[in-house]
Each structure stands twice: as C-alpha cells, then as structure tokens.
Amino acid sequence: MYSFTEENYLKTIYHLSQQKHPESVTTNAIAELLQTKAASVTDMLKKLSDKKLISYVKYQGVNLTEKGRKVAIGTVRKHRLWEVFLFDKLKFGWDEVHEVAEQLEHIQSDNLIEKLDAFLNYPTVDPHGDPIPRKDGTIKNQKLTPLVECKKNTQVVMSGVKEHSVSFLQHLNKMELSLGKKIKIHEVHEFDRSMVLMVDKGTKILVSNEVAKNILVSEV
Amino acid sequence: MYSFTEENYLKTIYHLSQQKHPESVTTNAIAELLQTKAASVTDMLKKLSDKKLISYVKYQGVNLTEKGRKVAIGTVRKHRLWEVFLFDKLKFGWDEVHEVAEQLEHIQSDNLIEKLDAFLNYPTVDPHGDPIPRKDGTIKNQKLTPLVECKKNTQVVMSGVKEHSVSFLQHLNKMELSLGKKIKIHEVHEFDRSMVLMVDKGTKILVSNEVAKNILVSEV
DNA sequence: GCCTATTTTTAGATAAGCCTAAAAATAGTT
DNA sequence: AACTATTTTTAGGCTTATCTAAAAATAGGC
Ligand SMILES: [Mn+2]
Ligand SMILES: [Mn+2]
Ligand SMILES: [Mn+2]
Ligand SMILES: [Mn+2]
C-alpha cells in the first residue's frame, strides 16, 4: 500500500507530533530524525500532501490527517510487535532490536501482523516499555514517572525509558537495570542530584541525574 | 550489502541454473520468472557483471560466479528459514508462506538469521520439503522420487513437491495430502495413469497423473 | 550461405527518492 | 519598519530500477 519511505516519513511525523503538542512538525525536525536533507523532506511532504496523508501549508509545517495517522500508528504497531518478537523469542538485547525492527516494520502483510500478534500472545508493551497500538488504532497510554521525580524511600518498578539510544540502553545493561526491576530510592545526593538505588533488594547502586531523568517507573 | 533487487535477480539466476544444467541462463527466462521485461534484465545483467556476481557474455546468457552463488544461496537460506518460521510458528498454510518470505528474505542482518535458525532449532527443510542451505553455503540434497515413478503396492512418505504454485498446494490441501503422510500405492490405472493411494491407512484417494508427477516421495 | 523468426541489446523515457546550491519566506531584533 | 539570521522551498542533477520501441545478433531451415 505505502512505500518503505512513505511509512518512515509518516512514523517520524507521528513521533514528532507526540513530542511537541500541539505545534506543527517542522521540515528540519523531520530531516534530522530521518538523517536526510531538508530539501528531500520538502519533496516528500508535497507527495504525502497530494495523497491526503498530511495537511501541509508551505513554510507552516505539517500535521497528520486522520488517514496519515492511521498509517503511522500501523507502522508503530508493526515496529513494536517485531521488537517484542526479537527480544522475547530470538533473545536479542533491548539495545539491538530497534535497528532490525526498522526494516521488519515495512513488510507488507496484514495477515502476518495479526498472526505475529497472536503468536506473541497479544503483548501490550514493547521491550522499551512503550505501548503497542491495538489493531483498531487505539493506544493504551499508561503514564510513567521519571525516576528523578521519586522521593527518598519510595518503592517503584522500572517500566520504561525516555531515551532510546543504543549507548544509553547499553549503559543500563552494565548497571544491570532492566524493565521489571524493583527499585527503592535509598538516598538522593543534593550536590549532583545523583541517586542511590536498592535494586531487587540486592546491592546498592549509584545512578547519575542524567540517567535518573531517563528511567521511567510506575508504582509497585 | 546487496539491494532487494540484486538479491532477487541472483536468486532467480540460481534457481534457473539448477533447473537446466549445465546451460547458461537466458535473459528471457529471467525476465519471465521475475515478471519483468527483457530490456530491464539486460540492464541488471550489466550491473551484476560489473560487480563480478555473474559471468556474462552478450547474447550468450549468464552464469553465477562463486561470489554470486554465495549471495544467491544466502538468499535462498533466508527465504526458507522464514518459510519455516511462518509455517511452524505463525501457523501459515504452505500455500501462503512463499509470498511473505519473498519480502522477509531481504531483511539485512546476519545476526537475525543466525538467531532465527537457532530459534527454529536448525531446520533442514522448508515447508515444501526443499533443503535449507547451511550457514557455510553447503546444501544437503536428498534425492526425492516423483510419486508417479512408484510401483503398485510400494509404501512411501510424501516429502516434497515439484510444483510450488499456490493453486497446486491448495489442491493438495483439499486432498488432505501434506508432507510426512504415509502413502501406499493401491492401484495405477493404465488408461489415464491416475493413481489410487491409501493415505495414513485411512480412506483411499485418487490422484491424477498430473498431480502424481508433482508429488515427491522418499522411502519409509 | 542466405533468409527469417526469435532473442537480446540499445536508445531514450519515466518515476521514486535523494542531493547541492540558490532563492524565497519567516521570525527575531532593533 | 527595516535588517538579519534561520528556515524552507525551488531549481537542476543524480542513481536505481523500470518501461517501450527500434536495432542488432543469433539460430535454424532450406
Ligand atoms: Mn523503518
Ligand atoms: Mn521500542
Ligand atoms: Mn524476494
Ligand atoms: Mn519453499
């Protein structure tokens, strides 16, 4: 139905429009996320606009139409289901799944995605804790709190990440921090806002403020 | 490493060179299998030749080089592993797997294929009974016999198909014939060379000569 | 050896997606 | 309101993979 490239653009516009609501998405922002040039983005925006997938006014940025939003969410759904497959079944690391899912998300077969969903037992979140859109396009968005906002002595569960970069995920691997771990905030250092955590009742570990800002937790 | 299109051309040349040995593969044969035009094929042959993937002499047809054969076999390996995944894990029918595997085979990640292979428990044949090339490029080719060559009262196991079309596979579904079934040749009608089979010691079924020619069997 | 049907290649276009460089529009500052 | 820095678009090209139509090569019959 839609090309590899069109799906990538729509997904990118979708992600950007989630970030800075309710502003329109800019040409440069798209170019940066897609690692391409602004001129190329303008070309594609015209094409997507012709196909009624976005509403686009020259120089004013873009917004997804309902039609475009459906395609974008469908692509996000495919991406996250594949990530679950790679992580749960093939034993990829959570730092490795994104790159491969970036390709797999463009395989065209509705039947494939439905069967994959069933095979994975209808997962609701991906390996990074992000929600998997349902087939009908709805998304159950559970609000997660940045670890940094938690007070001393509270008990929480690590449930997501704000930053998705490979280097950040690998850093968490080294710290043996992964989704599902029970975390108790043992101490918060005033000086640099670093936190001492008690993980799964094991040894205490220290995380920097930068790390604590990018870990998302939920109540026990 | 190699594009979607290049992989498809190399795989097609490989399949054609398997069929009619030791002749060179012709431009028209490639065009027909790929559902494209001869002029387009000539363009691609030049490109593949420049990349030393095929040996190509104008008007004389093509042959894969060792380098090209490796890429082709790698693609066949990926295709058949994905078919096993779709059939065994996602419960696709054997008439449905080819189309989707045609896309999945182009996902670029050596790691993915190794992990998929392990997940599937290192299968040796795909859902059509075709051998899966090993990682090192070797292929264990067990010789299968066309059912039509079997004599009355012999007992065999259905182990492959010669024809891979969706309509033939669906016809076999209707007849409840699938890989692994034990077949005893109960009778061979002289008139139209149709055969009466006893399947899994159940009821007798009649298959036409056309069908019997395209079923491959091995000894019990 | 020549003629003809068939196959294959060349020539010239097209479409998608990308690029650089230049021009135009916008937004922020005075 | 005018100047300027930044953003965005346009203009013109490039690459990959296609196509149609025409030209060239080949193979087979006589
Ligand atoms: Mn992608
Ligand atoms: Mn994810
Ligand atoms: Mn393919
Ligand atoms: Mn197969």
Image (tube, coloured by chain):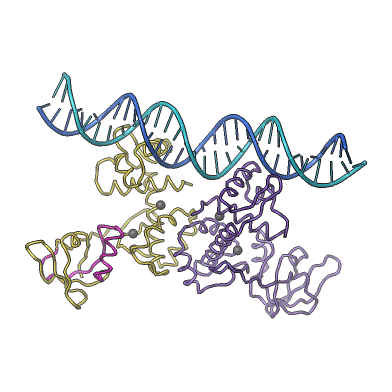
Chain colours: A yellow, B purple, C blue, D cyan
- Using the rendered view, name the quadrant where residue C7 is placed: top right
Which residue shows up at 50% across the image and 74% down it? B121
Q: Is residue A21 left or right of residue A39?
A: left
Q: How many numbered marks, from 0 up?
A: 0
Which residue shows up at 67% across the image and 63% down it? B171
Q: Is residue C25 left or right of residue C28?
A: right
Which residue shows up at 33% across the image and 63% down it? A95
Q: Is residue B155 left or right of residue B76?
A: right
User: Closer to the camera, B103 or C13?
Assistant: C13
Q: Is residue A55 left or right of residue B63?
A: left
Residue found farthest to the left = A190
Whether residue A174 is in magenta: the answer is yes
Seen in the picture, residue B152 relative to B57 is either above or below; the reply is below
Q: Quadrant of the C terminus of chain A?
A: bottom left
User: What x and y, as percent, mark residue A142?
Assistant: 26, 60
Q: Which quadrant of the render holds ligand 2?
A: bottom left
